[in-house]
Image (cartoon, rainbow, N blue to C red):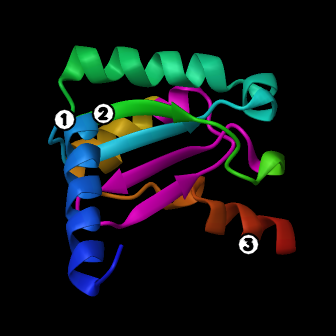
Amino acid sequence: MKSLEDLKKMREAALKKVEMREGGKDYRVVVGMATCGIAAGARPVLNKLVEETANHDYNCVVTQTGCIGMCVYEPIVEVYEKNGAHTTYVHVNPDKAARILAEHVGQGHIVEEYTVDAAKKAQEA
């Protein structure tokens, strides 16, 4: 990398790779599947997300990642929107996962009571 122009070209190439991986969908749904997530029940959550996405043709890609870094809140599901915004859902179970897809991905409405912010507020109370 020798210039700002080189950096811009690298960024564009990286964004194209991400877009190809996401399949041009409006949402990317990511499940934390590190040991802590799996132990807390992330596998049935991932399975439910994949099943619901296939059955309802939601405009999203479901993927998995390693540790998200908030083990106490596992299972964690993050929903990334095409515009760069993302929402972190915590203590997700298969029923919550289905609702997250239906309301957030299907209708564009964040399910506030499942977010990390709601969990932190409840913990402080």
Return the disc, 2 or 3, that comes first in the chain's sequence: 2
Quarter occupied by residue 59 = top left
Residue that badge 2 annotates: 61
Return the disc, 1 or 3, that comes first in the chain's sequence: 1
Residue that badge 1 annotates: 23
Residue that badge 3 annotates: 121
Kindly identify the amino acid type of the residue bearing the numbered disc 3. Answer: Lys
Kindly identify the amino acid type of the residue bearing the numbered disc 1. Answer: Gly
Q: Residue drawn 30% across and 33% down?
A: 61
- Quarter of the picture holding the C terminus: bottom right
- 13 with respect to 118 (left or right): left
Instruction: Give the magenta range.
Output: 73-97
Q: Residue drawn 53% across and 27% down?
A: 95
Q: Is residue 5 magenta?
A: no
Q: Residue drawn 37% across and 54% down?
A: 80
Q: Position of residue 67 (x, y in %)?
A: 71, 43
Q: Is disc 1 placed on a helix, strand or loop?
A: loop
Q: CA distance from mark 1 to mark 3?
A: 35 Å
Q: Is residue 74 magenta?
A: yes
- 92 with respect to 102 (left or right): right
Q: CA distance from mark 1 to mark 2?
A: 7 Å
Q: Is disc 2 placed on a helix, strand or loop?
A: strand
Q: Position of residue 89 (x, y in %)?
A: 57, 51
Towards the viewer: 108 or 9: 9
Q: CA distance from mark 2 to mark 3?
A: 30 Å
Look at discs 1 and 2 and give the one toward the viewer. Answer: 1
Specify few, some or many for label 3: CA neighbours under 10 Å numbering under 14, 14-19, or 20 or more.
few
Circles 1 and 2, Cβ within 8 Å, touching? The answer is: yes
Kindly identify the amino acid type of the residue bearing the numbered disc 2. Answer: Val
Specify few, some or many for label 2: CA neighbours under 10 Å numbering under 14, 14-19, or 20 or more.
many
Q: Residue drawn 63% across and 18% down?
A: 43
Outermost residue toward the front in this view = 2
